[in-house]
Amino acid sequence: MNLWTIQEADFTPATQHHKETIFTTGNGYLATRGTFEEGFPNDRRATFLHGVFDAAPLVVTELANAPDWLPFEIFLNGERFALDRGSVISFERALDLRNGVLTRRVEWESPRGERAAIVFERFASLAALHALFLRVRVTPQHASEIHVRAGLNGTPISEGSQGERLLHWNWQGQGARDGNVFLQARTFHSDIELGAAMRVTTTLGNEVAREFWDVRGEPTLALRVNAGAGETVMFEKTVSYYTSRDVEKARVVECALQELDAHKNWASAYQANADAWQEEWERTDVVIEGDEEAQLALRFNLFQMLIAAPRHDDRVNIGAKTLSGFGYRGHAFWDTEIFMLPLFIYTAPHIAKNLLNYRYRLLDAARAKAKQNGFEGAQFPWESADTGEEVTPTWLPHYADRTKLIRIWTGDIEIHISADIAYAAHQYWVATGDYEWLIAKGAELILDTAKFWAARAEWNNANARYEYNDVIGPDEYHEHVNNNYYTNRLAQWNLQTAFDTLNWLNEHAPKKARELEARLGLNAARLDKWRDVIAKMYLPALPNGLLLQFQDYLQRTDVDLAALEPRTISVQQHFGIEGTNETQVLKQPDVLMLMYLLQNNFSEKQVRLNYDFYTPRTDHTFGSSLGPSIQAIMACKVGKPDDAYEHFIRALRADLYDVRGNAHDGIHGASAGGTWQAVVFGFGGLRVTKEGWSIEPRLPHHWTRLQFRFFYHGKQEIVEIVADGG
Amino acid sequence: MNLWTIQEADFTPATQHHKETIFTTGNGYLATRGTFEEGFPNDRRATFLHGVFDAAPLVVTELANAPDWLPFEIFLNGERFALDRGSVISFERALDLRNGVLTRRVEWESPRGERAAIVFERFASLAALHALFLRVRVTPQHASEIHVRAGLNGTPISEGSQGERLLHWNWQGQGARDGNVFLQARTFHSDIELGAAMRVTTTLGNEVAREFWDVRGEPTLALRVNAGAGETVMFEKTVSYYTSRDVEKARVVECALQELDAHKNWASAYQANADAWQEEWERTDVVIEGDEEAQLALRFNLFQMLIAAPRHDDRVNIGAKTLSGFGYRGHAFWDTEIFMLPLFIYTAPHIAKNLLNYRYRLLDAARAKAKQNGFEGAQFPWESADTGEEVTPTWLPHYADRTKLIRIWTGDIEIHISADIAYAAHQYWVATGDYEWLIAKGAELILDTAKFWAARAEWNNANARYEYNDVIGPDEYHEHVNNNYYTNRLAQWNLQTAFDTLNWLNEHAPKKARELEARLGLNAARLDKWRDVIAKMYLPALPNGLLLQFQDYLQRTDVDLAALEPRTISVQQHFGIEGTNETQVLKQPDVLMLMYLLQNNFSEKQVRLNYDFYTPRTDHTFGSSLGPSIQAIMACKVGKPDDAYEHFIRALRADLYDVRGNAHDGIHGASAGGTWQAVVFGFGGLRVTKEGWSIEPRLPHHWTRLQFRFFYHGKQEIVEIVADGG
């Protein structure tokens, strides 16, 4: 088994959209779904560029599917190659995780009997983020005139949330220069200018004719070559993108054309890309021995994180579905800070810093949201795109009755994200020791979210305590609950950490402390209020140490989930939205999640008590895709590594096996990021504090060896764990 | 002044969308907005084919902007011709209403100084509904290589209700045959197959090169010709469309290609089209002397009706914005039956029959709507498209705050449309004497809508009367009113007319009478109920004869509209939706409308009383665009032809002058149809009954002569009215 390659040996049209997601390639500047260059009926062709959003109905804004760089049609003696025509003799597709190269090998026979072997290879260069490379080799069985058409498609389609097909690009111009072709387009609403350029070459010197088909919106180079029987003709298509997010508007085409000049041939571009990937894996790879499936699948999940990670830009975040599909329209959630970010904090701190800076840059928008809701401080949006304004849809048409609408509440009341972001900023600091960043940006993130929590806290006079009522916790099976433990406790942590941060600043950067105190109005009265909120925060729990999911949680119906097995739908689908809300069933175990985040605060006994209580009450299989990796970690903590493995493998398979049936919408980014945490913090038992790190491994019984790497305070550490029997 | 030509002498980009609407050409099978062949930034290019709908978010379904037949780019020695580049030396555009030919003459100088005179002429043939013709003549000042690119664009954009750009066509195939090019595409949701074919010729024999640019989705013919200084090169582009609404799916491309063969040259196609238009005008034209503006504008309005009228198909209706824009997404309202249909009943009964058959064909959908609402009989949808289901959007995003939604109630409670349709069926019969149609279809329309009205009537026990509560009348400034006079009275008329129809059937077609009685369940008990509803229908009025807009209308605030002048916004914008609802201000005078429809039922004195009362309470200028022509008719009835003229000219100018600022969305079809009624029934004073017709002319003082034509019981009548002073 090749532990670095995702492979398929035949093509099934019914699963094409799932596979398009799986075979996504990218470099963190952009990503392209694994569609076929020549097209296939109803394919979902998409290339997403980080930060290139445009307005869309209902969902507010979405990543604008960019002009398509893939089009490459092949005609053999006049017959168009396509997998829905003629006969497919053999088919093989392989994604090499080691270097991000996607290869497709096809033997095909046309309706009239022309036969050829065709190999497509492509990659988005990790060494040159604006450049994309495609190589096509055609070997006809008989002497053939081979006609190819390579284009840039300026009318790429976004499939909308209601099945509508949307276009985001307004044609601005196109042309040819020195044999290369360019296209210029602009988003209709967000006014982002894009330049794309293309070079097409044949490497065997048997080119007979070349035409520039200057059709508006789809400039195309048409090449004719003659090939003898069994002779291989090779084509190289190189494409580059620049947008007005990169350079000034007037220069996008010029920069795209220049980029082409910087990449003279496939071989050197291929090597540069491979070198860049090697560096990446040296920081990131995890070795698992004794479990080939887990080894390969984990690398796949890491690869998905690496191709979505913005190395070049701190104005973007990673969407819940990365850059690999239309799901959630490219919006970012807490999925980044809690599930994906730890991977980067520990293996690529420069990327983690970019992601956190994205939040820092959008502090003003978070302040505006708080203000609009009558609070002070920074309230981050539940869904975030380019501007930092709340982009959660408020209403969506009811799936069954179009005259009805479903109100989406998460944008209004799933408020824990502000504490999640503060937590992530703090975690970054603890792991990296990046004091400079803490002073310049992190402290302000922590202080201003704390300010929000103090303002948002509701004083309950009867019980002399502060509360957060009418919220949604991470467990979205329960809406409009009061005093969700996760939310209340993490808000309290946020306030406490704000004090710690302010104290630290006063000691180490007093000028900054004074500046922030002045700018954020952190006067004595306000800080007294903070202390009061911390001291009197209501944290619903039983005397035995059971933390309550939320106030009155125990009054909900206790459901025997095992009795519903075998089950192929979520509990929410089983009982309905309202019905599920009345039960104790959780979409994800957020009390356990909190115990993971604040692990020093709970005794082993208390963790076990809560683990045993909440585990059978959680919809692990069809609830949140975020849950399983955290559940795996907590299973390790209570000494159940084989139970942990069951949850871990569920997370690991989320996309590869399409276990939830929605991988066509894109990669489950939080699940992918979570698998790394499950391995490192769960099975590996890594524990990091300001004082240092330690491990307490608990490997699944069949693992013989585990090796992982991480940075602690700038130094790469390599941990190798060998099982007792190994 | 040319009284048959709409002209403009310069091009103003700021009004381009308005002018695109004005210069729409068509033939009732399709229509194409007056955009430029070569494109212009942000143009709204659209060709709509009758009945070709596809699903769209929020608005349910919309006319799918069809693959674009216009693309024709011209390069002079390598420089692309476009009006946003270089210098426009002269510009002229003219729409010849006599034959539907749109001509554009431009003298243009390129950025580098190439200069040429270019003439574009195009028409949709009225003689061959599937065929479209474009002729382009290019006369360069200096010897030039002229490069043209003529294509079919398979990715036409629909501008959505929220500013989004939608695409409805899924590419299926394309190619070239015998030098002609074809494209095949399918709507994404409604599964309508479309074939388009194109031929391009140069007529001067100086073609140097021709290439087929087979770019997917936009097959293009690229031609190169050489022209000497001052020499004119002529190009002809002929395009044809077929869809699976016309022929079976597999044949759409073949039929489109065959259609091209049937039209060998511009000259003969031009003549055939001109002949067909001449016939059309011989049925339709109205001559006004003494008022050139009215003469030309009326012809323009008639032209807009003629190019939207389905001569070939009884499965379609005319949308509120005809086929000329994206407004109301191609949906049909009562605008057809009450405002547009009379023109066709009297000048082209075969078209009127098609339009009524559309409703007849969709009776089952109307029955389903009634049933869904708990009633029996046929309740027609407020907005209707291809299937006859209700396609009124139920919710639209609030224009100012996207988290809010506006509930659109018309689809639920603007129920008068069912009586309007019955009225139209009856009027068709009265004017045409088409007994065959009445027996086959009309009677069922009248009887089954009556059945709905009887079921929908609410018995008010306290007052011993039947009522229709919680409705919207034609006057949409007042929602959720009780006992709208127009609705109640026309429902009563519908029931009474059902009895008359049943009696007539029993006498003249007893077999049909028995069939309908059996099929519709018209038993004694049901008919007794009908009689009871007729007898006890509540018709709110004062003892002096003033009909009340609705029950409790007089309790609303009486507003002095004159005091709001000068005014550039509607009363609804002035007071807000809720505020206006509290006033007596009407969007349109629907009591007067009723008096027009049922004119034999009211004394002259009563008409005058109501006219004087409601006229100052109506928002004539910015209320409904449907109102002015009816107001004009009623002004004539009360002997005020010069007041009438003021309303008439407002209707006449609606689109030409864009008096409401929304002509970019398409022609106001009801206003256009209403102007014909204002002339014929208002100024001409035509009155038609089963027994015959009469006229009582009341010309505006400056009109010297009025001539109009109409069919009565199959015979064309010509009326000529000469003013006393003339």
Image (cartoon, coloured by chain):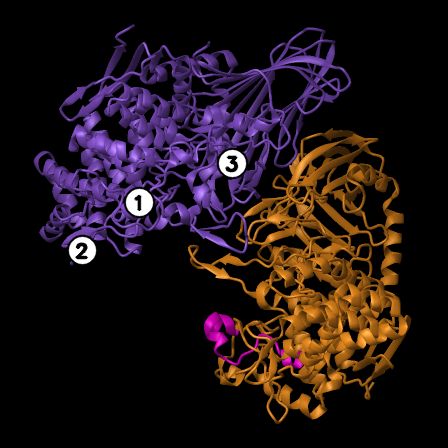
Chain colours: A orange, B purple
Give the image location of residue B109, x and y in percent.
71, 16
- Give the residue type at disc 2: Trp
Q: Which residue is mark 2?
A: B459
**Residue A412, quarter of picture:** bottom right
- Give the residue type at disc 1: Phe
Give the image location of residue A286, x and y in percent.
81, 72
Nearest to the observer: residue B455 or residue A377 = A377
Image quarter hosting the C terminus of chain A:
bottom right
Crowdedness near tag 3: few (<14), some (14–19) or many (≥20) residues, C-alpha within 10 Å? many
Q: Which residue is mark 1?
A: B380
- Give the residue type at disc 3: Asn
Q: Is residue A631 above or below residue B672?
A: below
Real-space Cα distance between discs 1 and 2?
A: 22 Å
Is A371 in the magenta?
A: no
Chain letter of disc 1? B
Nearest to the observer: residue A375 or residue B676 = A375
Real-space Cα distance between discs 3 and 1?
A: 26 Å
Residue B444 lies left or right of residue B391; in this view the side is left
Chain letter of disc 2? B
Image quarter hosting the N terminus of chain A:
bottom right
Element under disc 3: loop
Compare marks 3 and 1 and give the one earlier in the sequence. 3
Q: Which residue is mark 3?
A: B65
Stretch in magenta = A571-593
